Amino acid sequence: MMDIKNHYDVVIVGAGPAGAGAAKALTASGLETLMVEHDAMPRYKMCSGVLFPGSVKTVADDFGELPEEVFCRPREIKGNRAYLNEEAPCIEVSFSAFGDDESLPENGLNIKRAELDQWLCQRSDARIIDHCRFEGCEKDGDGYIIKLKHEGQELTVRSRYLVGADGTMSRVRKTAFPDFDEKIGLIPNYEEFYRGSIDLEPGWLYLFLDRKFTGFFATVFHKDDIIVVVTGVKHKEPVKEYFQAFKKHLEGKHGLRVDEQIDSHGIMLHDMSASKNYCLGKNNLLLVGEAGGFLRGGEGITSSLVSGRAAGRAILKSEESGRPAIDFFEELARPELDACEKVHAMLAAMAGFNVFMR
Ligand SMILES: Cc1cc2nc3c(=O)[nH]c(=O)nc-3n(C[C@H](O)[C@H](O)[C@H](O)COP(=O)(O)OP(=O)(O)OC[C@H]3O[C@@H](n4cnc5c(N)ncnc54)[C@H](O)[C@@H]3O)c2cc1C
């Protein structure tokens, strides 16, 4: 058993960008922080792996210069090319056309999520333990008694603050708010990796919105020499059937030729942000990133880094004032909630419908 202490000032559940954002904001504060991650690190997270300009700036400002090992070819992504339906012409929306913040770089970056997330987490001074699952917690005065399972062994730690950065299906959220998930719309996603060719120029994130053959939405992008095809559908609709229909569409209309399928994955997304249905936490338990519902349309990494950072700062303010961290988090997270709502409104204006709630 790794040396895990009985008591921490802060426990962060999840080693994605939201957990990294919180851990980084607490670095050098003197608060002893434990980050627990369910999977083996570096862990794969199904994601297009595009650092939108907002993420590029947030990473540079808060974490420093990205190391070479996180990049994929082509290194830069210019924006989205979207097809609203089978007949409609391609709409090209460069990332720079999306916002009015001139401090942002023009292009996004094409990265490997596993390597990125590990690097982000290691830039903090949190103690990181992988193969370690959050199983539940109960209140203990102003803090929490947290149940963990590390490599099959159960253990308990006490912590004054608990940050749920454990993604879409957050167990921390479910423990603290057992009924909340009933109000969430889930969007199953499925992806396959191919060697082969396609008549879509690399350097763009392709988005397809025709419900007939995508379910909800579908994307195509390049990671080094790999073509990645993804579909996301309404909950309980057959994601693999839609996937096959979309693949056929790509073969017929965009020259997809598959020489070899090399991998496949599935994941859930939710509609919390699209339906303005957030869950920020209570007392000294804070929910960040997708656990809290933070998602700027497809730009989840920015939202996770920024909401994580807000949680870290809220904990520091709680320490100074003796007031619960949630009082500060609600205020510090407000600009990010506004940013999420703005992006969903822009997406709906472009598509003519709420892309996450069809
Ligand atoms: C198909 C797809 C494509 C996407 N493409 C992009 C993109 O190109 N750009 C972008 O900005 N965003 C993209 N997103 C969104 C982005 O991936 C997410 O918003 C982002 O990863 C959320 O970060 P997070 O830190 O909140 O959660 P996650 O990155 O999901 O991290 C949560 C971590 O918590 C761990 N965990 C879960 N439960 C437990 C537990 N009980 N105990 C311990 N650990 C636990 C998980 O293993 C995981 O490592 C995409 C999403 C999907 C589904």
Image (cartoon, rainbow, N blue to C red):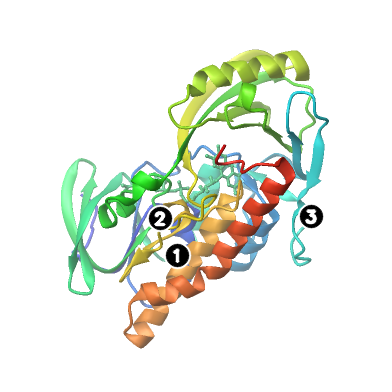
The mark lying in front, picked from 1 and 3, is: 3
Residue positioned 75% across, 21% down in the render: 198
Q: Quadrant of residue 61?
A: bottom right
Amino acid type, residue under disc 1 in the picture: Ala
Q: Are marks 1 and 2 in contact (CB under 8 Å)?
A: yes
Query: Which comes before the other along the chain, label 1 or label 2?
Result: 1
Q: Which mark is residue 165?
A: 2
Query: Which comes before the other along the chain, label 3 or label 2?
Result: 3
Task: Name the residue at the bottom extreme.
Answer: 321
Residue positioned 59% across, 64% down in the render: 338
Q: Quadrant of residue 85?
A: top right
Residue 124 appears anywhere in the view: no
Q: Does residue 2 sit above or below 44 in this rendering?
A: below
As measured in the structure, the alpha-carbon distance from the residue carrying label 1 to the one carrying label 2 is: 9 Å
Q: Quadrant of the C terminus?
A: top right
Q: Which SS class for mark 1? A: helix
Q: Is mark 2 within 8 Å of ligand 1?
A: yes
Residue positioned 61% across, 14% down in the render: 260
As measured in the structure, the alpha-carbon distance from the residue carrying label 1 to the one carrying label 3 is: 28 Å
User: Which residue matches tag 1?
Assistant: 22
